[in-house]
Image: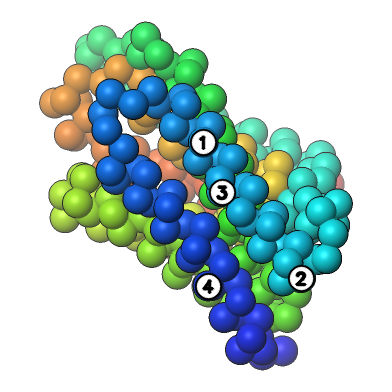
Amino acid sequence: MKVPSNTLIKVYVAAGLVIIPLVAAAFFTPPDFPMLLRQVLLCVWGVGATLGFERLLFSGSWGRAWQRVGFVRVRRSMALVALLVSLPMWLFLPLLAWLQDTPIQLRSDGWALLVGVILVNGITEEVIHRGFVFGHLRQEWSFWPAAMLSALLFAGQHLYLIFILGWISGLASVLLAALLAFPLAYSYAHGGNSLGGPAILHTSSNAPMIILALPPTFLATALLPYMGVVLVSIYLVFILDRCLDTN
């Protein structure tokens, strides 16, 4: 079934109004601003504004809005799948550092950074892109077209990384975001329209690179291979979920 234009416009415009302040904060926040406080504020804004748009445009009540954006219990098998495919993402950098005899360790503020990744990447971005955007498009279109439309917006949110990481790494990050949108959407839909699966996967795809203290020379050579490991690992969601279903 074709997505009615008003639904597509509503979710894109509403999501855009939520995303723009998030991107602006990521790009313009002063370096000395407390990172965890910034992440908490971004989560409050992103989740709160998305719930507000969900209630206003679609659900009509806060309780229904809360459920519609994915705050429901995840299917157990999908939670297990998400944890299993996350393992290579967490193990790759420590293993590569060990093979190259490169010392790495958890950053002094690593636990605070991890909480920040969970709040913004795992929860806030998944509420916006999977719970709100993909969730509504999926109601009126088949999986792949709905995932494609949500992937375009998800990739667009990451364009600012070109200015931070440079053209090669930045464009690779944008492409990676677009490709990751499909297994993230799958884990949302097949996890019972729950944020549980994609929140685990999204956190795992970002956290290791952020919470570990990585030497610059090691980071320069490890970034693109790490992206490849993330991409291959997360696409195993499609295979493992079906294996568990058949067993």
Instruction: Identify which amino acid the numbered label 4 is placed on.
Output: Val
Q: Is residue 12 above or below residue 69?
A: below
The answer to whether the residue labelled 1 contacts the one labelled 3, judged by CB atoms less than 8 Å apart, is no
In the picture, measured across the screen, residue 229 lies left or right of residue 225, that is right
Q: Residue beneath label 3, please?
A: 46
Whether the residues at callouts 1 and 4 have beta carbons within 8 Å, the answer is: no
Give how far apart the Cα atoms at labels 2 and 1 are: 25 Å
Residue at 42% of width from left, 58% of height from top? 20
**Percent of width and height locating residue 192:** 81, 53
Mark 1 / mark 4, whichever is N-terminal: 4
Using the rendered image of the protein, determine whether residue 73 is visible from the camera's viewpoint: yes
Image position of 76 with respect to 11: above or below: above
What percent of the width, then of the height, locates residue 92? 40, 28
What's the residue type where badge 1 is placed?
Answer: Leu
Alpha carbon separation for disc pair 1 and 4: 22 Å
Picture quadrant where residue 209 is located: top left
Q: In this figure, which residue is indicated by the disc labeled 2? A: 58
Lateral position of residue 10 relative to residue 74, left or right: left
**Label 1 to label 3: alpha-carbon separation:** 8 Å
Estimate how packed mark 1 is, as few (under 14), some (14 to 19) or many (20 or more) residues with alpha carbons within 10 Å.
Answer: some
Q: Which residue is mark 4?
A: 13
**Image point (59%, 40%), residue name:** 44
Instruction: Give the position of the N terminus as an image quadrant.
Output: bottom right
Q: Which residue is mark 1?
A: 41
